[in-house]
């Protein structure tokens, strides 16, 4: 499904004093700006159309043509339109998901934008937008991962939020001794196990090693990877995880947290609303950043990030770059990520978030306490074929940890063929 939204210059020529200011500052743009977007669901579509209208008001001599394509269809069409008849701006995703288009020369190097002063406010995602030392897009929204936990149960057991791995393990032992699982997880669809690997590997070996491993440049049988699994096994061997988690989806594991049979869940912020809807109050539910394992390893986070790019075949590069500057501005990111819009997090450190406990905590963490960088998540950072094989192995490890050597050998074989 595709629809086209055209913004005629005349319709907005009289709007906003800001347009006059833009012209006075020498930023007048003209010609056509063609934008392709996958923001097809109702709320994201309204956000996209609103951005186009506001940008058009700033540049009344510019004719903007926005084409919105169904998100799943977009994934199959993007290579074709980037190759045959490229727009000036296109939506996509960060990190390894953009690599095929970077390697094919289909996304423009925009490192010059990232050298501008305001882009320092996007520093938390610079690594996710960087390939081979250059930047190839800009971020407009993301959301945090972390440990969502039953604060009332912590209070009952006399526990505090851990900041180190030793504290995490000690807390888990107290929780297990109380007859509960430390962590809910539903690994039937595999990706939740990928989240656990992401965090333990990034905390053990750092973001750079983790990214290099998922890019195929490190061995799955290395000492570094073995150390990650050894740390993970500490929690498995003490019975820290929900039993039979391989039988549950992530949603099907939520009731164990609601009923107090499991105390915490390593998950994305999208889990908060269903937990609230199931009856947990904000007085019962809280959040903490996954604790440090190696003290000398800077904290990195999973924060799946959506992006805009300038195709190499863009015709109006000047207007495209100005649109990207507009997209990443603090004012715009505050507006589009509000609760009545995307309901997610702005990346710009100078933006603000809605008065929601978990969004505020996530924004503070990602803006101020993720010096190690921002990963996109296991199945975004690794090629699809490798991610599928590897996540099967990760789930198997959680159920049968003694199979580790066989699992690592399989993943190393897959690395040799997939990449």
Image (tube, rainbow, N blue to C red):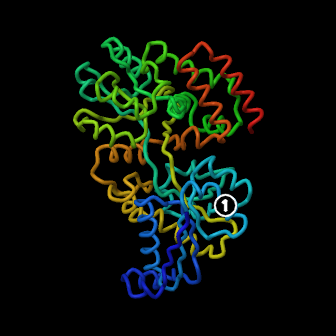
Residue at left offset 46%, top offset 54% = 141
Give whichever of 75, 82 is nearer the camera: 75
Residue at left offset 39%, top offset 80% = 18
Residue that mark 1 sits on: 107
Q: Locate residue 362: give its quadrant.
A: top left
Q: Position of residue 25 (x, y in %)?
A: 47, 81
Q: In the figure, 404 relative to 357: above or below?
A: above
Q: Is residue 115 left or right of residue 414?
A: left
Give whichever of 221, 414 is nearer the camera: 414
Q: Locate residue 410: give its quadrant.
A: top right
Q: Where's the C terminus, which quadrant?
A: top right
Q: In the figure, 133 relative to 51: above or below?
A: above
Q: Where's the N terminus, which quadrant?
A: bottom right
Residue at left offset 44%, top offset 57% = 348
Q: Position of residue 403 (x, y in %)?
A: 62, 15
Q: Position of residue 416 (x, y in %)?
A: 77, 32
Q: Locate residue 395: give its quadrant.
A: top right
């Amino acid at each position: 499904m595709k629809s086209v939204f055209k913004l005629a210059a005349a319709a907005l020529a009289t709007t906003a004093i800001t347009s006059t200011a833009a012209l006075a500052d020498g930023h007048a743009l003209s010609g056509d700006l063609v934008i392709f977007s996958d923001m097809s669901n109702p709320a994201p579509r309204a956000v996209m159309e609103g951005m186009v209208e506001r940008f058009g008001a700033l540049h009344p001599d510019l004719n903007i043509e926005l084409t919105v394509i169904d998100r799943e269809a977009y994934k199959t069409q993007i290579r074709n339109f980037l190759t045959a008849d490229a727009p000036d701006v296109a939506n996509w995703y960060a990190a390894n998901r953009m690599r095929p288009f970077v390697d094919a020369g289909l996304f423009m190097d925009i490192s010059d934008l990232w050298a501008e002063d305001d882009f320092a406010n996007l520093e938390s995602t610079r690594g996710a937008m960087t390939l081979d030392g250059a930047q190839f897009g800009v971020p407009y929204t993301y959301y945090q991962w972390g440990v969502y936990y039953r604060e009332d149960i912590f209070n009952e057991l006399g526990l505090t939020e851990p900041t180190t791995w030793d504290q995490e393990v000690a807390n888990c032992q107290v929780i297990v001794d109380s007859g509960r699982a430390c962590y809910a997880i539903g690994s039937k669809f595999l990706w939740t196990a990928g989240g656990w690997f992401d965090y333990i590997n990034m905390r053990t070996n750092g973001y750079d090693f983790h990214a290099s491993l998922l890019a195929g440049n490190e061995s799955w049988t290395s000492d570094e990877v073995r150390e990650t699994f050894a740390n993970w096994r500490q929690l498995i061997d003490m019975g820290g995880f929900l039993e039979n988690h391989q039988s549950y989806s992530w949603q099907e594991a939520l009731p164990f947290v609601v009923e107090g049979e499991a105390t915490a869940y390593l998950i994305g912020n999208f889990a908060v609303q269903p937990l609230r809807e199931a009856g947990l109050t904000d007085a019962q539910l809280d959040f903490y950043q996954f604790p440090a394992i190696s003290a000398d390893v800077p904290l990195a986070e999973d924060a799946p990030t959506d992006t805009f790019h300038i195709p190499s075949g863009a015709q109006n590069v000047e207007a495209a770059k100005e649109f990207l500057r507009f997209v990443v501005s603090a004012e715009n990111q505050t507006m589009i990520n509000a609760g009545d819009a995307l309901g997610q997090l702005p990346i710009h450190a100078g933006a603000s978030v809605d008065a929601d406990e978990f969004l505020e905590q996530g924004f503070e963490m990602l803006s101020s306490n993720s010096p190690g960088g921002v990963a996109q998540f296991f199945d975004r950072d690794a090629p699809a074929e490798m991610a599928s094989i590897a996540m099967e192995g990760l789930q198997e490890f959680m159920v049968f940890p003694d199979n580790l050597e066989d699992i690592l050998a399989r993943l190393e074989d897959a690395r040799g063929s997939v990449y």
